[in-house]
Amino acid sequence: MTITIALDAETINSLDLSAVKEKISNLPTDKAVTNYEQQLKFVINYKQEAEDPRELSEIAEIRLWFVCLDANYPWLPFLLDWRSGELARYTAMLVPHQFSRSEGIIYNPEALEIYVMHKIFVLSIWCQQRGISSTSRLKSFAKLFGYDIDDSFFESIKAV
C-alpha cells in the first residue's frame, strides 16, 4: 500500500506541505501506523535546464523544502520506503554530501553521525509514544548508514 506524494516546482518553491499533511493526517496515530511503515515515496517533478548537471539534492530550493518537511515531521523516516532508496534521498536532502560515480552518495561523516543519532532519538520517542517496538527498527536504520549500535545504547535511551 504505497503512499506517493507528488512535488512540483510551485509546491517546493512555496514550501507547501499540504500534500504531505493530507496523506499523513489520514494515518493511524497509534501502533497501527506500522501498517504504513516504509511505504512512502516522493515523486519530484522539478524542471531543470538541460545544461544543469545538479542532482535534485543539490538544488537549494528542494533541500529547503525537505528541511521544512523534516522540521514538521521529524519522524518521517519511519514511513519512507527504504528499499527503493527513498531514505537515502531524504537524507541527502538534509545532510551535506558529495556524489561519486563509483561509490554513489558520500555523506559528510560528522554531519551524518549527528543526523543518525538525532533520528534515533526522535524515532525512539515517537515509537514509544505509539507502543511500537523500536530497537530492531532503529538498529536497521543506523546500519543503512554504516553504524552498528549496541543494544545497551537503546536500553539507556528508553528513559529519555
Image (cartoon, helix red, strand yellow):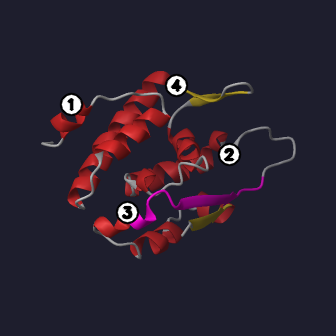
Look at label 1 and name its amino acid.
Ser
Q: Which mark is residue 56?
A: 2
Q: Secondary structure at mark 2?
A: helix
Q: Is the C-beta separation of discs 4 and 3 under 8 Å?
A: no
111 on left or right of 58:
left
Seen in the picture, residue 77 relative to 113 is either above or below; the reply is below
- The part of the chain drawn in magenta is 34-47
Disc 1 vs disc 2: which is toward the camera? 1
Q: Quadrant of the C terminus?
A: top left
**Which badge, 4 or 2, comes first in the chain's sequence?**
2
**Which badge, 4 or 3, comes first in the chain's sequence?**
3
Q: Which residue is found at the position 21% from the left and 30% from the top?
A: 152
Residue wearing tag 4: 108
Residue wearing tag 3: 34
**Which badge, 2 or 3, comes first in the chain's sequence?**
3
Disc 4 vs disc 3: which is toward the camera? 3
Instruction: Reply yes or no: does residue 95 show up in magenta.
Output: no
Residue 62 in the image, given as x and y percentages of width and height: 61, 50
Q: CA distance from mark 4 to mark 2?
A: 17 Å
Disc 1 vs disc 4: which is toward the camera? 1
Look at label 3 and name its amino acid.
Thr
